[in-house]
Image: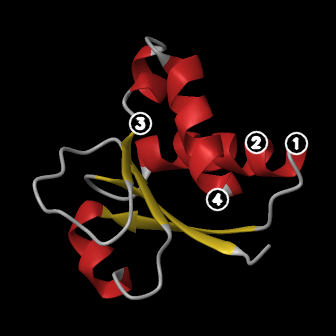
Amino acid sequence: MAKKQVLVACGAGIATSTVVNSAIEEMAKEHKIDVNLIQIKIAEVNAYVDTADLLVTTAMVKTSYPFPVINARSFLTGIGLAETKDQILDELKK
C-alpha cells in the first residue's frame, strides 16, 4: 500500500493540530499504515491539493477539495471521538 499523505490542519497550525497529529500517528502505527503527516494552517491546504490523500482538521472548512475532509473537533471535545477515529482509519486503509 502506498504511503498516505495526511494533512492535519487547525486555524493556526499549532495547538489543536498537534493533538490530532499524535493521535493519527498512534493509529497508523497500531494498524501498520504508512503515513506522511503534514501539520499546517488551514490556509495552507491549497498548496497540497495535488499530493494529499486526506485532510483532518479542527477548523471550519468551506472549500471543497479533491480528497476527503474529516472534521476532528471531537479530538478536543471528546464527543464522537471513536467515530472520528474510525472514519480516519477507514480513509487510511483505502
> Does 55 sit above or below residue 27?
below
Crowd rating for badge 3 (residues with CA inside 10 Å; few <14, some 14–19, many 20+): many
Q: Position of residue 21 (x, y in %)?
A: 59, 50
- Quick check: marks 4 and 2 in contact, CB under 8 Å? no
Amino acid on which disc 4 is placed:
Lys
Q: CA distance from mark 1 to mark 2?
A: 5 Å
Closer to the camera, 71 or 92?
A: 92
Q: How many numbered badges does the structure rendering display? A: 4
Please report whichever mark, 4 or 2, sits nearer to the chain's N-terminal start: 2
Q: Quadrant of residue 34?
A: bottom right
The residue wearing badge 3 is 72
Are the two marked residues, 1 and 3, in contact with CB atoms closer than 8 angstroms?
no
Q: Is residue 74 above or below residue 87?
A: above
Q: Are marks 3 and 4 in contact (CB under 8 Å)?
A: no
Residue 4 place in picture, x, y as percent: 64, 71
Q: Tell me the amino acid under the disc marked 3.
A: Ala
Quadrant housing residue 71: top left
Q: Are marks 2 and 3 in contact (CB under 8 Å)?
A: no
User: Disc 2 and disc 3: Cα gap in Å?
Assistant: 14 Å
